[in-house]
Image (cartoon, rainbow, N blue to C red):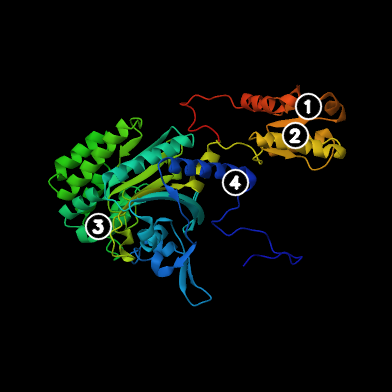
């Protein structure tokens, strides 16, 4: 329960693992979402939405007993006696949605979905119990072209958000499953992969210890088997080096050969599509802990904030909708971890210091001129510029202090004498410069002043990860 103080008032606190978003965080968060939507649409993905609450059996249909995600699920019995839960990702609800509506949608079907999800995991830097996901998926095809496009979308998305120093790590579950089958571990593959997915959180010794644990929740491998699995995950070198080593050791296995071939095709097409060399990296340690992945898997890391974890992850899930329909609905997609990315940008100092979405404040000198102030604001808004009119005629210093505190770029200052002369003053707040312009030239003058405060930046900069929003 929330605490109460001596006056009987409830202490205003958020739950552990949850957070508020004041304007200085909510504004860039919305801009990230707008960019994600624009990128997804540019590839032909259409928007959908689904309820936050689902039947519990829908959410757990593909969750194995003892799986970590099952422990993190928020579930309860509602007023109607139904067992329900809050969605822990957007992929499972999409599988249910597709099974329910695919006869109208047709296949292949490409969708994007931005929405909050909930997981009762331990809060960490950039990881919360309520967080926003920005998913995109293609369902209804097993073509590797859809897997390749997923990597292209991730690349386009991160670059549209202003990042250049990032890496998309990819692997293939068929490759991993084939190697484990060769080792006689096919029946324990899920347990092995769940533990292997902890690499990064645990060191090699910790993963080996868990793999060899006799606890029934773990794989129970021999020491030799565990070291072989970790050795595979630890392969390094160029993409060709890693794939050549895997092919030399396990290429006779049909599953491994298929996984390697699909990864090679992905790399080749991505290069031809203009993805810079080194952006996509083969990483045998990437397996994604969720049980429903069956093919290519993706995790994306910011090179200047690697410890924040993957900011865009996903994979192929050919059997996910099989619990809801007999129709085959294979799919592939990924999800941008919006709040994790926002936390990384905040830590890297890449968020603008602003608490307003409008760049222009109109100072109010005299209430008798409110109509004229609002007319100026309407003209600028019609030109696509956000404007706020200060609500009351207070001292100029008070209004300019407000403008500085909120992060406005420009202040427009006009008193009775200025209106009589048909003039208005444009003050560039950061530079503390001011010049007068004719009211008839207000829109182009404001546009020019705003542009002067946002000079073009070079695309590649060695000292930072991204351009501020």
Q: What residue would you read off at disc 1?
A: 424
In the picture as drawn, the residue positioned furthest to the front comes out as: 104
Marks 3 and 1 sit apart, C-alpha to C-alpha, by 71 Å
Q: x and y percent of residue 412 in the render?
A: 75, 31
Q: Secondary structure at mark 2?
A: helix
Residue 451 placement (x, y as % from top left): 62, 26
Pick the residue in front: 101 or 305: 101
Q: Earlier in the sequence, mark 1 or mark 4?
A: 4
Instruction: Residue at 71%, 29% (x, y): give it.
Output: 429
- Residue 200, x across and y down, in percent: 37, 46
Residue under the image location 42 percent in, 69 percent down: 56
Q: Quadrant of the C terminus?
A: top right
Name the residue nearer the viewer: 22 or 184: 22
Q: Is residue 90 left or right of residue 7?
A: left
Question: In the figure, 201 relative to 276: above or below?
Answer: below
Question: Where does label 4 land, which residue?
Answer: 26
């Amino acid at each position: 329960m929330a605490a109460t103080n001596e006056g009987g008032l409830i202490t205003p606190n958020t739950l552990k693992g949850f957070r508020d978003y004041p304007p200085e965080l909510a504004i860039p968060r919305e801009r990230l979402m707008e960019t994600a939507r624009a990128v997804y649409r540019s590839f032909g993905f259409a928007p959908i939405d689904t309820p936050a609450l689902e039947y519990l059996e829908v959410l757990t249909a593909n969750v194995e007993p003892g799986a970590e995600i099952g422990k993190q699920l928020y579930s309860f019995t509602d007023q109607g006696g139904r067992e329900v839960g809050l969605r822990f990702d957007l992929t499972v609800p999409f599988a249910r949605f597709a099974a329910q509506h695919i006869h109208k949608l047709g296949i292949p079907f490409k969708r994007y979905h931005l929405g909050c999800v909930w997981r009762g995991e331990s809060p960490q830097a950039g990881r919360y119990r309520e967080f926003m996901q920005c998913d995109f998926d293609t369902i209804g095809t097993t073509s590797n072209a859809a897997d390749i496009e997923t990597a292209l979308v991730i690349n386009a998305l991160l670059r549209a958000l202003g990042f250049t120093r990032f890496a998309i790590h990819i692997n293939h579950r068929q490759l991993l499953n084939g190697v484990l089958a060769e080792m006689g571990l096919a029946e324990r593959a899920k347990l092995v992969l769940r533990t292997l997915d902890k690499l990064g959180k645990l060191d090699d010794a910790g993963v080996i210890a868990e793999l060899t644990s006799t606890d029934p929740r773990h794989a129970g491998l021999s020491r030799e088997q565990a070291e072989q699995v970790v050795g595979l995950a630890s392969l390094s070198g160029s993409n060709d080096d890693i794939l050549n080593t895997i092919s030399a050791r396990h290429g006779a296995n049909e599953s491994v050969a298929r996984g390697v071939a699909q990864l090679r095709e992905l790399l080749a097409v991505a290069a031809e599509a203009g993805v810079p060399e080194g952006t996509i990296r083969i990483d045998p340690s990437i397996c994604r802990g969720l049980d429903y992945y069956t093919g290519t898997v993706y995790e994306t890391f910011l090179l200047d904030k690697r410890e924040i974890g993957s900011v865009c992850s996903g994979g192929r899930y050919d059997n996910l909708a099989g619990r809801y329909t007999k129709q085959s609905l294979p799919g592939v997609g990924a999800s941008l971890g919006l709040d994790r990315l926002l936390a990384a940008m905040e830590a890297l100092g890449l968020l603008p210091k602003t608490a307003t979405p409008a760049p222009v404040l109109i100072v109010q000198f005299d209430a008798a001129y409110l109509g004229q102030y609002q007319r100026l604001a309407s003209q600028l808004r019609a030109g696509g510029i956000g404007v706020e009119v200060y609500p009351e005629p207070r001292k100029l210093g008070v209004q300019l202090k407000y403008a500085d505190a909120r992060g406005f770029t420009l202040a427009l200052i006009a008193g009775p004498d200025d209106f009589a002369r048909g003039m208005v003053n444009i003050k560039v707040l950061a530079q503390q410069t001011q010049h007068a312009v004719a009211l008839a030239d207000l829109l182009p003058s404001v546009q020019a002043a705003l542009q002067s405060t946002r000079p073009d930046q070079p695309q590649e900069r060695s000292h930072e990860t991204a351009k501020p929003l």
